[in-house]
Amino acid sequence: METMKRVGIALSIIIFVLVLLLSSTAAQGGKIRGRRRLPCKQMVFYFHDILYNGKNAKNATSAIVGAPAWGNRTAMAGQSNFGDLIIFDDPITMDNNLHSTPVGRAQGFYFYDRKDVYTAWMGFSFVFNSTQHKGSINFAGANPVLNKTRDISVIGGTGDFFMARGLATLMTDAFEDDVYFRLRTHVKLYECW
Ligand SMILES: *[C@@H]1O[C@H](CO)[C@@H](O)[C@H](O)[C@H]1NC(C)=O
Ligand SMILES: *[C@@H]1O[C@H](CO)[C@@H](O)[C@H](O)[C@H]1NC(C)=O
Ligand SMILES: *[C@@H]1O[C@H](CO)[C@@H](O)[C@H](O)[C@H]1NC(C)=O
Ligand SMILES: *[C@@H]1O[C@H](CO)[C@@H](O)[C@H](O)[C@H]1NC(C)=O
């Protein structure tokens, strides 16, 4: 009888501990039961945007293609550039030098979508056709440009980057008036094939 009782007590303690463990992991929800997910592939690139300003047609890699009624297509519209839509075909380099040999092109658009703060929405691809990389990585998301770093989604890829999923941390590495900026792009893929 005495041993049965002890076994009973031991069992209830085990069940109690199990319930505690389960409830603590459930509370962590989004972290996938306490497991931290790490990227399976990371890469750093820079891309360089030279905006057409009416004088630099030869060098410009991007152009305002849409502006609100109070603006035009040679200068940003004011009010945090609200309403300006820009299309770009920018060189991508491995370091922060505009004159380094490009490894690909960053192609897409961004538009400013807030009047009181500089913030843009971007949709673009990194297109690679070099011995290092072949294929593309597709990006989309909000880019609150005044934040030191901001994350946008990696929503897919082709070629070497087939089925890529993850995010990219953007950082403004240089900014000169409204004409030139350089974005450091730290790509972190959480799905690799
Ligand atoms: C175009 O780029 C070259 C090389 O960086 C530079 O010397 C030149 O001043 C630029 N021209 C314009 C109009 O921005
Ligand atoms: C475009 O707008 C800017 C700023 O308002 C102004 O300085 C410039 O003269 C305008 N350019 C044209 C071609 O209308
Ligand atoms: C990629 O580069 C190769 C070799 O330079 C060229 O033959 C091919 O047309 C290029 N592909 C694309 C999609 O640009
Ligand atoms: C802006 O940066 C801060 C810290 O630097 C971060 O907490 C916040 O999430 C960022 N916001 C966006 C929208 O990326």
Image: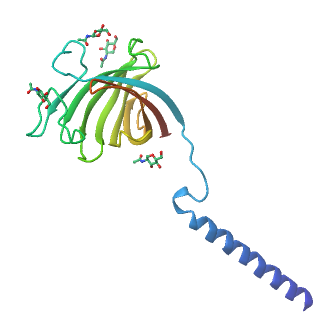
From the viewer's perspective, is residue 141 above or below residue 63? below
Closer to us: 89 or 62: 62
Residue 23 appears in which quarter of the rendering?
bottom right
Locate residue 67, reporting x and y percent.
13, 36
Instruction: Depth check: give the residue in front, 138 or 101.
Output: 101
**Residue at the bottom extreme of this rendering:** 1
| Image quadrant where residue 142 sits | top left
Image quadrant in which you'd find residue 130:
top left
Check the image and report above or below for 133 versus 156: above
Q: Do we see residue 74 in this rendering? A: yes
Residue located 29% across and 40% down the image: 120
Task: Give me the residue at 39% from left, 11% from top.
Answer: 99
User: Horizontal and vertical percent for residue 176?
Assistant: 33, 24
Q: Quadrant of ligand 2?
A: top left
Percent across and percent down for residue 108 are 26, 31
Which image quadrant: the N terminus? bottom right
Q: Tell me which residue sits at (25%, 26%) in the image.
A: 88
Whether residue 191 is visible to the viewer of this picture, yes or no, is no
Residue 63 on image: x %, y %: 19, 26
Q: Is residue 4 left or right of residue 118?
A: right
Q: Is residue 57 left or right of residue 158?
A: left
| Most distant residue in the left direction | 69
Q: Is residue 124 left or right of residue 25?
A: left
- Say whether residue 66 is left or right of residue 27: left
Give the camera-side residue of 140 and 82: 82
**Residue ranking furthest to the right:** 2
